[in-house]
Structure formats: structure tokens, C-alpha cells
Image (cartoon, grey):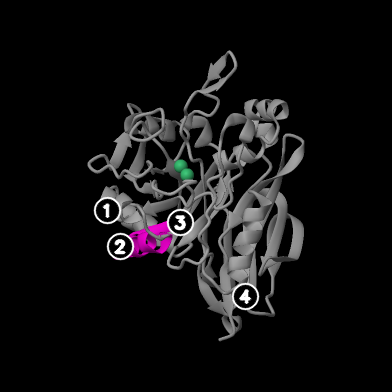
Amino acid sequence: MFEYVGNLHAHTTTSDGAGSHGLVAAAAIRAGLDFVVITDHNVWVSGVEGYYQNRHRERVLLLTGEEVHDMTREPQRNHLLVFGAGREMAAAGQGQRAQALLDAVRQAGGVAFLAHPIDRAVPWAGEGSYSWDDWDVAGYTGLELWNYMSTVKAMLPHMISGILRLLAPATAVIGPDPDILALWDALLQEGRRVVAIGSADAHAAPMQMGPLRRVIYPYQFLFRCVNTHVLVEHPLSGSWEADAAALYSALERGHAFVGYSLPGSPRGFRFEALNGDRTAAIMGDQVSLADCEALLATAPAAARLRLLHNGRAVAEQDGRTLTYTPARPGAYRVEAWKPYRGRRRGWIFSNPIYVTLA
Ligand SMILES: [Zn+2]
Ligand SMILES: [Zn+2]
């Protein structure tokens, strides 16, 4: 498999972001990303997708999705990330149940992810919560397990401590919201397939705090934080349309993991089901108990590795590898926690391998 690292959630001046598409692409290149998806609010921009190259001939694939929500509804929650629909989807999200939008995305051949499913309000800063409310929906591919800027919001319940944390995110951010992890595990336990992604939700807007006005979270910094690592069968071709299709297809199948790059590059992490020397499944796949001799997680550096079965830890160990022989069907996923700046932080979150009875 070939690994490509990208950020699936960023805003430009087309909605409420501070940078142009070109500026976001340049920042993504400097951050070492392979691809970046622009998801402006309720607007899909065509004609800008493709490979962007800098003068050192380094390149990034820039794609445009969309972050859609019902603007007629208060509060304006239920943000949905749409990828690969290839057309404007905002109209399908207005004044309707969230299911209508999900159906329309499917019809357009796109995939949908629930954005920042649990999002904390910051009353002292006048910031509301943009959680997902309508849990009776079906047909979404997955959810944002770790939205970096939403994690930052969650660190700010009180003003003074909040401002200090805001100014030192590398020290303050620990991992994804534990309630989102629990929510995801609960959905997996119900037997659902839910693909987890991680993203920046980059706006790069200047923040005003009294006399202080600065961009604390520029695109380039955010693209070095939480990203989605996608595994595809063949190397990307350089033709943007084919490459977009390959990335979205892998994402839809859950051939991906969430990585936080500040504690160390998560590139190279793998989680697979083995039968003898053969790889019977990789993350996102289904495999029968009989075809799964062992589950193997391999990290690119030493970390605390945890294997969870339907949300419960069944194996935990320090090192670069972890093996486990599953005795029961269910969703198995791996977390890696790595020391950084004085404490252990969420580093890698794999998508599950779904072990079935037959
Ligand atoms: Zn949002
Ligand atoms: Zn957003």
C-alpha cells in the first residue's frame, strides 16, 4: 500500500478563511502534505482543483469539497463534510432534515463525514457549539474523530487559562475529545461501519483578544498537526482526477488513520490482519475469524500501543509493535500514545478492522 497524507478540512476567503486557494496549497506543500481538501461553508468551488507546484517543484494535490449546514436553522449545527460530489450541494441542505442532504450526496456519488460531532461552546468568546444533533440519520461514511480547531475550542472553558492555552497549543492539546472517541466506539459497537478522519478545520483568521490581534493558527502550523493518512493500492498517477478518485475511494473504505504529527511523524503506521505470511485485511476491511490468525499493529517509533475491541482495551504495551489473536468478532482498532512535551499525547488512531464470525 502507498501512504498519502492530507488534510480534509480547510477554509479559504471563499467562506470564512483568511487565505486563497493558492496560499493554502503553498502552506500545504511547506507542511509536507500530499493533498489538501478545501471545504468552504455552503459553497463548492470548481475550476481550482489540481496539482499545485512551488518553485522547488514540490507539489500538492488540492481538491475542493464542501462543508454544508442548514443556514435556516438555529443554532446552525449539523455541519457535514462532503467530498467527491463534483457539484454544489448546499441547496440540498437548506430547510430540510439532515437525511435529505445525506441522500443527495450519495446520489451525486460523494461521501459525507459528520464534522466536529461534539463541539464545545466558548461562551466568554461568543463562540457557540456546532455539534452534530441529528443522530437518527444513515448513509454517512464516517465522522471527524479529531478536528484540531474544535479540540482547541474545548480547551477554553475559562478566559484566562483559555488564552494561555490558546497561545501554546502544542503544550495544551492532548488528543481527540474522549467523548467523541466514546461516541465512535458506541456506533461501532452497534455494528456500524464508521470511518474516522482527522483534520485541521483551518481558517487562519486573526484572533482579537483585547489589544492583541494575531494569527495564532496559520495554515502551515495546522497542516503539521492532525491529518488523515490514506492508504491506496497504487501510487498516485499525477492526473488529479484519477488521484482524487483513488483517495476518496480509499477513504470510503476506511483505508486510513488519523495522525498527530507534532509528537513525531506518524507516516509508516500500519494495522493489519494476518493469516500466515499473508495480509488478510488492512484497517477499514472486514475479515472472518477463521482468516485472521493475528492482528498486528506496527508504529514508526516507540509508543504506548492500545488495541480496543468494541471500545474496550484488550491489549496494551509499549514499543513499536503489538500483536493480538482475536477470539471474538467485532471492531478492533488501535491507538498509539506518544510522550511529547512532558506528557503522553494521542498520536495515531487507526480505523477498525471488522472481524466477523464467518
Ligand atoms: Zn464546521
Ligand atoms: Zn470548518
- Write the residue at 42% across / 59% down: 98
- The residue carrying mark 4 is 330
Query: Is disc 2 placed on a helix, strand or loop?
Result: loop
Position of residue 298 measured from the top left corner of the image (x, y, whole percent): 63, 58
Badge number at residue 86: 1
Query: Is disc 1 placed on a helix, strand or loop?
Result: loop
On whether ligand 2 comes within 8 Å of the CB at mark 2, the answer is no
Reply above or below: 139 against 320: below
Crowd class of label 4 (few under 14; some 14 to 19; many from 20; radius 10 Å): many
Which residue type does callout 3 highlight?
Answer: Phe
Position of residue 139 measured from the top left corner of the image (x, y, whole percent): 42, 67
Residue in front for this viewpoint, 98 or 351? 98
Residue 235 can be seen in this image: no
Residue 284 can be seen in this image: yes
Apparent side of residue 326 relative to residue 29 in the rendered image (left or right): right
Alpha-carbon span between mark 1 and mark 4: 35 Å
Which residue type does callout 2 highlight?
Answer: Gly
Badge number at residue 109: 2
Position of residue 124 measured from the top left corner of the image (x, y, whole percent): 63, 30
Is there CB contact under 8 Å for labels 1 and 2? yes
Crowd class of label 3 (few under 14; some 14 to 19; many from 20; radius 10 Å): many
From the viewer's perspective, is the residue at label 3 or at label 4 nearer? 3
Alpha-carbon span between mark 3 and mark 2: 14 Å
- The residue carrying mark 3 is 113
Which residue type does callout 1 highlight?
Answer: Gly
